[in-house]
Amino acid sequence: MKNAAIIFLWVIHFSALIGIALGYETFFLGKSPFTMLYITALLAVFFPIMDLKTLGLFTICFVTGMTAEWIGVHTGWLFGEYSYGDNFGPKLDGIPFLIGVNWAVLTFVTHAIASKQTSNPWAISVIGASLMVILDFFLEQICDYAGFWSFTGGAGWYNYLCWFIIAFILHYIATHYKLKGDFKTSLHIYIVQLIFASILWIIISTI
């Protein structure tokens, strides 16, 4: 069942890339919230997120992400001057609920990947936060085109610094929760998003 779910994860991402390349970007990018919900469901079942302790940590990551994004959008103190588009689903005061979910999902999957490399909590936090920033860098190249979010003047070093600091804190909290998750599922969730953003960036560059 897990293998089938992971294969379907890759299918929907590459189907979207093919569809966008053929000129159906409005249809496929508009379905982004459903893709995010599928990724979340995949994480919940196979990571898994089944006990109250793990669910509590997921909630902490969600609330932290939503709060940081609210501060960023409404004050510019975090990340820079930016706003969210329409392709990330319903919003709370300008912040898509799914962006909070995304913070939690990325924290969990990168933590599982980082924990596979070392048991040192500081090293896990640095590796995990770095992986999140790397993915954010590629997402920043496609976010405006995809209708996810848009920066005034583009995302600069300050955005990535804020991402790293907040991600580091979340990972360090996760080490104290002794978060353990399925490495295979986490790796596929991370890599498929990285490849999707990379290829879409190439497609955009050729348009």
Image (cartoon, rainbow, N blue to C red):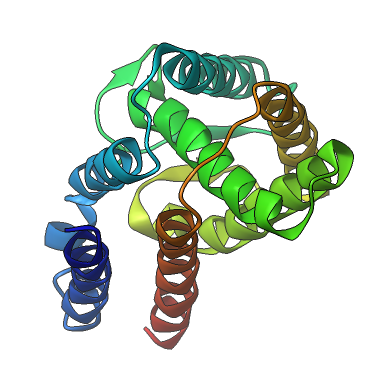
Depth order, front residue of 5/141: 5
Residue drawn at point x = 16 percent, y = 58 percent: 1
Q: Is residue 155 left or right of residue 5?
A: right
Asked whether residue 155 appears in the rendered view, the answer is no
Depth order, front residue of 112/90: 112
Q: Position of residue 100 (x, y in %)?
A: 45, 26
Q: Position of residue 149 (x, y in %)?
A: 45, 42
Residue drawn at point x = 17 percent, y = 50 percent: 31
Asked whether residue 50 appears in the rendered view, the answer is yes
- Furthest toward the bottom, the residue is 206
Q: Is residue 184 left or right of residue 73?
A: left
Residue drawn at point x = 18 percent, y = 50 percent: 30
Give the answer, above or below, for where 2 lies relative to 104: below
Q: Position of residue 104 (x, y in %)?
A: 50, 31
Give the answer, above or below, for where 97 lies relative to 79: above
Total numbered labels: 0
Residue drawn at point x = 42 percent, y = 88 percent: 206
Q: Is residue 147 left or right of residue 5?
A: right
Q: Is residue 15 left or right of residue 175?
A: left
Q: Position of residue 110 (x, y in %)?
A: 60, 49
Depth order, front residue of 125/23: 125
Image quadrant where one finds the C terminus: bottom left
Examine the image and state in which quarter residue 73 appears. top right
Depth order, front residue of 45/135: 45
